[in-house]
Amino acid sequence: MEMKTAFLPAFIQSYFIALGVLVGGALIGGFGAFLSGEPPLTMMYRFASSLKIWALIAAIGGTFDTFYSVERGFFQGETRDVIKQFLLILSATGGAQTGMTFIRWFTQEHGA
């Protein structure tokens, strides 16, 4: 059974979950790269780049609830759900982008 949370806490949590997944995954991956003899900072940047989409998925819940809400919004006229889901995705995107910026600053990589 899933508990419904208020929008503002979900919005804030979405941002920080995406940020945490990206930064945490890149840091731990960099440590693993160090242990295996690979360049840790370069690998951290690569890991962060590939973790970006997974940070978004983790932040929005990793389920199809988002898609059901959007479907309900379009086909049943509940536009409030569509707007809420869009804002949650936007928040998660901001968290992932912030995490990517932190990793870019830390590693001094300047990839595209």
Image (cartoon, rainbow, N blue to C red):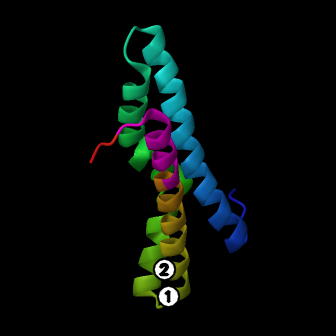
Residue 87 visible in the shown view: yes
Amino acid type, residue under disc 1 in the picture:
Thr
In the depicted structure, whether residue 72 falls above or below residue 16: below
**Residue at 46%, 54% in the rendered image:** 97
**Residue at 53%, 29% in the rendered image:** 27
For the residues labelled 1 and 2, the Cα–Cα distance comes to 5 Å
Amino acid type, residue under disc 2 in the picture:
Val
* In the displayed structure image, the side of residue 67 where residue 24 appears, left or right: right
Q: Quadrant of the N terminus?
A: bottom right
* In the displayed structure image, the side of residue 107 where residue 13 appears, left or right: right
**Residue at 37%, 14% in the rendered image:** 38
In the image shown, does 20 or 83 lie closer to the viewer? 20
10 Å crowding of disc 1: few (<14), some (14-19), many (20+): some
**Residue at 54%, 65% in the rendered image:** 91
Picture disc at residue 79: 1
Q: Secondary structure at mark 2?
A: helix
Q: Secondary structure at mark 1?
A: helix
Per the rendered image, the range of residues in magenta is 98-109
Do the residues bearing badges 1 and 2 touch, measured as CB atoms within 8 Å?
yes
> Is 102 covered by the magenta stretch?
yes
The picture places residue 102, in percent across and down from the top left corner, at 52, 45
Q: Which residue is mark 2?
A: 82
> Is 108 covered by the magenta stretch?
yes
The picture places residue 19, in percent across and down from the top left corner, at 56, 49
